[in-house]
Image (cartoon, rainbow, N blue to C red):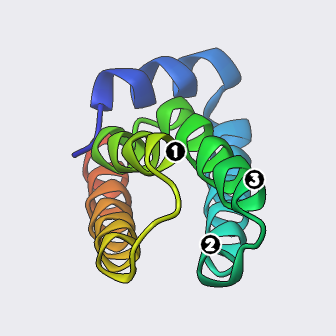
Amino acid sequence: MIDWDRVSILRDEVGGEAFNEVVTMFLDEVEETLSTLSTATPVADLLDALHFLKGSALSLGFRTFAALCHNGDQAAPMQTGELDTLLGTYRQSKTEFLTGLAERFSS
């Protein structure tokens, strides 16, 4: 679900303190964008949102979530079930990510 190699590379590139800021900004922006998906009209807005989510997710190692965003980006408009799956996958990814950060990078 999480590409920990990508996470480690990003953390090494920006440093520990800046990485924490990147994570906070990522989570805030992704959650704000996710809250707009169900009402995104026209379809171009939905595609833009999914493209943004995919890029953000890839940069921070949310591999499975990014793949779902890519699939939605290719097949918009999303159906309600697909949106529910996307949101659920994000929540699972976020939980795994935050738990993994604490285990891997706490010092």
Between residue 10 and residue 38, name the one nearer to us: 38
Q: Secondary structure at mark 1?
A: helix
* Mark sitting earlier along the chain (3/1): 3
Q: Residue at x 33, y 70 (%)?
A: 82
Badge number at residue 17: none
Q: Look at mark 1 in the image and give the residue it sits on.
A: 73
* Mark sitting earlier along the chain (2/3): 2
Q: Is residue 101 left or right of residue 33?
A: left
Q: CA distance from mark 2 to mark 3?
A: 19 Å
Asked if the residue under mark 3 is in contact with the one under mark 2, i.e. CB atoms within 8 Å, the reply is no
Is 102 above or below relative to 41? above
- On the image, which quarter does residue 6 sit in? top left
Q: Quadrant of the C terminus?
A: top left
Q: Look at mark 3 in the image and give the residue it sits on.
A: 44
Task: Give the residue type at disc 1.
Answer: Asp
Task: Give the residue type at disc 2.
Answer: Glu
Task: Give the residue type at disc 3.
Answer: Ala
Q: Look at mark 2 in the image and give the residue it sits on.
A: 31
**How packed is label 2: few (under 14 Cα within 10 Å), some, or many (20 or more)?**
some
**How packed is label 1: few (under 14 Cα within 10 Å), some, or many (20 or more)?**
many
Horizontal and vertical percent for residue 81? Answer: 29, 79
